[in-house]
Image (tube, coloured by chain):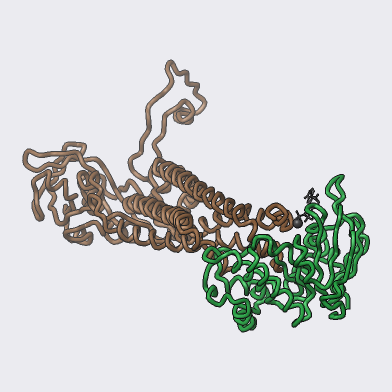
């Protein structure tokens, strides 16, 4: 039956070619679409994790309510509010940092953690000034948790520890200030006190917001500038699995009042964007494959109709119902397998090409996952088999005698 | 030996009874012509005896098999190895060459290698060697019909059923096809059951069964053709 199926396919060159193209595009489209989107999502995710780790632990900002004021006044006294308390109590600094670090060390899913102190300051050089984020890091632990060290293009993170008041500045910020390596710039804290710092490195992540507003320094330097020795604002945690970070975060937040947040909770917009993209992708692919399947169904249906006499003669020379079913199922299978393979090649080629396209900053990211290819292939093969099933069944249910009688 | 034994076969289409209790016995090696006016039930008898169609009552034993009550797979196996069909229209598979068409029944049981020699012999015998690699669309009606006969013969069947195989052919081609049936019948002892309108061809057969309104009007042996050949 296989040979006959091939011959049937080859005898209808245009139709077969169209079906083949449809299947190939369905499979290739799925692969390209999915690879690019997953690549982009992975890139975004890495970018988010790169800066802020899997989980961050900060002190909680708290709205002040009547309830939160309870116990503040003398015991037994009754307080009447003329107008209720309002405002926010914000504890910039993480009070229990030391306690946290001890606790994290014993938790199996925690790979590493590091302390940070972060604040908004103004930095200036000559007449130029800008409000920036001054981020104190632990140059030893930070690389174990995030990738920001990899974005340092001139100098390295360890240099921050080689003296006091040394900083690494975002490339665009440095340009804006008109400064260069080894220049001294000034940082002004919220008390108005001015600290000169020396630029020992340059930071370039490709993310303009960071590159324009971020200054890295050691924790000690930042504590010194903020005049709060020993304080930190944040603990950043790396876990064994970024995708399970929210579960881990929930576990960590038990028995603490501090704010424990996973990267995806902190970037809820990203998550919903991801879901929306996947949804649109699935709808598009589904529609396309539906159209292709319908085409296959139509062509095979017509073929079964055209080939009635031949089906009758096959039956009269000893071929069974199943043989005729197989004859038509095989055509769908052959077309979809060949189309699927072509689709895989198209997908692979296109993805390889897309990866070389330079987007501003970095080349396009494409996901390379064998499963994307496998899924694309299975998707078209299964839908083609599905589409050929009904025509094939029709072929099997034809009664040879009816056909012969009709034409005799 | 009995090739076909039919007892009180009835076939109806709704209220219309196409075969009215037909009984007959055909011995192995016979050459039987079935004749009768159009609409007399010839094709219906052919389909009923060969098991291509169901019957409403009666029995048909073919080569010892109760062909109407066998499981489908078994029927297909018997059709493949023991029966050959030739229809008025050639019914070749248009995507296959002559040789491939002839070998199609053998292919079903993966015997096409073994049957290749015989297929070539048949091509030669039917004088259609030049069509070996042609598609049906590239051949004349007579050539196609000979291919169809060759296909019916490839498995060396015990019985050949032919329903007006010459209906679409000119006299020269018709005679060629008839001669082939005759020779196959003589040489291989194949039972041939031939439906024909043509009295001349009917007389070439050893026996003529004439139908009228779904009944056997007469059933005669043709002395001139030697009734003793079976
Ligand atoms: N499927 C059917 N439904 C109803 N009536 C049918 C059917 N098939 C055949 N008949 C009727 O049965 C009768 C016998 O038909 P059959 O085909 O056997 O005739 P025939 O002898 O082969 O005729 P011809 O020489 O024209 O081929 C006819 O009257 C025909 O109308
Ligand atoms: Mg007829």
Q: Is residue B48 above or below residue A48?
A: below
Residue A230 x %, y %: 29, 50
Q: Is residue B158 above or below residue A137?
A: below
Please tell me which residue is depicted at 35% across the width and 48% down the height of the picture: A234
Please tell me which residue is depicted at 52% across the width and 26% down the height of the picture: A76
Q: Nearer the viewer, residue B100 or A386?
A: B100
Please tell me which residue is depicted at 73% across the width and 70% down the height of the picture: B84
Colour of chain B as rendered: green
Q: Nearer the viewer, residue A277 or A206?
A: A277
Q: Is residue B10 left or right of residue A9?
A: right
Q: Is residue B25 left or right of residue B94?
A: right
Colour of chain A as rendered: brown
Q: Is residue B122 left or right of residue A179?
A: right
* Image quarter (top left, top right, bottom left or bottom right) of the N terminus of chain B: bottom right
Q: Quadrant of residue A227?
A: top left
Q: Is residue A70 left or right of residue A184?
A: right
Residue B101 x %, y %: 60, 70
Tell me if I can see residue A221 in this picture: yes
């Amino acid at each position: 039956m296989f040979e006959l199926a091939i011959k049937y396919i080859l005898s209808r060159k245009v139709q077969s070619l169209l079906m083949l193209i449809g299947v190939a595009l369905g499979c290739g489209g799925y692969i390209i679409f999915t690879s690019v989107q997953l690549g982009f999502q992975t890139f975004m995710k890495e970018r988010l994790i790169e800066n802020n780790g899997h989980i961050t632990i900060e002190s909680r900002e708290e709205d002040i309510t009547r309830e939160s004021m309870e116990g503040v006044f003398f015991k037994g006294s009754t307080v009447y509010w003329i107008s209720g308390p309002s405002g926010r109590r914000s504890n910039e600094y993480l009070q229990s940092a030391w306690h946290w670090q001890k606790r994290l060390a014993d938790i199996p899913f925690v790979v590493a953690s590091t302390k940070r102190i972060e604040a908004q300051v103004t930095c200036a050089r000559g007449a130029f000034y800008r409000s920036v984020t001054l981020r104190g890091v632990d140059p030893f632990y930070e690389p174990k948790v995030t990738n920001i060290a990899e974005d340092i293009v001139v100098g390295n993170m360890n240099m921050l520890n080689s003296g006091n008041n040394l900083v690494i500045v975002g490339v665009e910020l440095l340009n804006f200030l008109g400064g260069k390596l080894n220049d001294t710039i000034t940082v002004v804290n919220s008390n108005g006190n001015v600290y000169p710092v020396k630029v020992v490195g340059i930071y370039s992540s490709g993310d303009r917001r960071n590159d324009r507003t971020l200054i890295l320094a050691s924790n000690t330097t930042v504590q010194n500038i903020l005049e709060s020795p020993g304080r930190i604002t944040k603990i950043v945690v790396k876990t064994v699995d970024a995708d399970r970070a929210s579960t881990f975060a929930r576990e960590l937040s038990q028995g603490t009042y501090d704010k424990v947040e996973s990267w995806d909770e902190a970037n809820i917009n990203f998550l919903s964007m991801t879901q929306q993209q996947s949804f649109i992708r699935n709808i598009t692919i589904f529609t396309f494959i539906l159209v292709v399947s319908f085409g296959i169904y139509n062509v095979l249906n017509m073929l079964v109709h055209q080939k009635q006499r031949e089906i009758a003669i096959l039956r009269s020379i000893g071929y069974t119902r199943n043989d005729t079913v197989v004859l038509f199922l095989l055509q769908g299978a052959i077309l979809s397998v060949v189309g699927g393979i072509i689709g895989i090649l198209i997908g692979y080629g296109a993805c390889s090409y897309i990866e070389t396209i330079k987007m501003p900053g970095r080349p396009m990211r494409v996901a390379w996952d064998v499963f994307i290819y496998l899924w694309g292939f299975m998707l078209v093969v299964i839908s083609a088999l599905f589409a050929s099933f009904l025509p094939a069944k029709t072929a099997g249910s034809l009664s040879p005698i009816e056909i012969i009688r009709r034409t005799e | 030996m009995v090739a076909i034994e039919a007892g009180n076969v009835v076939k109806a289409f709704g209220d219309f009874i196409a075969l009215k209790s037909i009984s007959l016995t055909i011995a192995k090696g016979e050459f039987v012509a079935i004749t009768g006016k159009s609409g007399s039930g010839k094709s219906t008898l052919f389909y009923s005896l060969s098991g291509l169609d169901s019957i409403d009552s009666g029995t048909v034993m073919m080569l010892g098999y109760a062909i109407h009550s066998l499981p489908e797979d078994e029927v297909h196996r018997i059709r493949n190895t023991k029966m050959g069909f030739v229809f008025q229209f050639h019914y070749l598979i248009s995507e296959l060459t002559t040789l491939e068409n002839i070998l199609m029944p053998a292919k079903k049981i993966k015997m096409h290698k073994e049957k290749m020699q015989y297929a070539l012999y048949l091509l030669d015998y039917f004088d259609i060697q030049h069509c070996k690699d042609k598609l049906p669309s590239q051949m004349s009606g007579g050539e196609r019909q000979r291919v169809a006969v060759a296909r019916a013969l490839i498995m060396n069947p015990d019985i050949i059923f032919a329903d007006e195989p010459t209906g679409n052919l000119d006299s020269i081609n018709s005679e060629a096809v008839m001669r082939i049936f005759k020779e196959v019948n003589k040489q291989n002892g194949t039972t041939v059951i031939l439906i024909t309108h043509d009295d001349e061809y009917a007389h070439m057969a050893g026996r003529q069964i004439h139908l009228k309104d779904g009944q056997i009007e007469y059933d005669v042996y043709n002395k001139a053709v030697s009734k003793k050949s079976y």
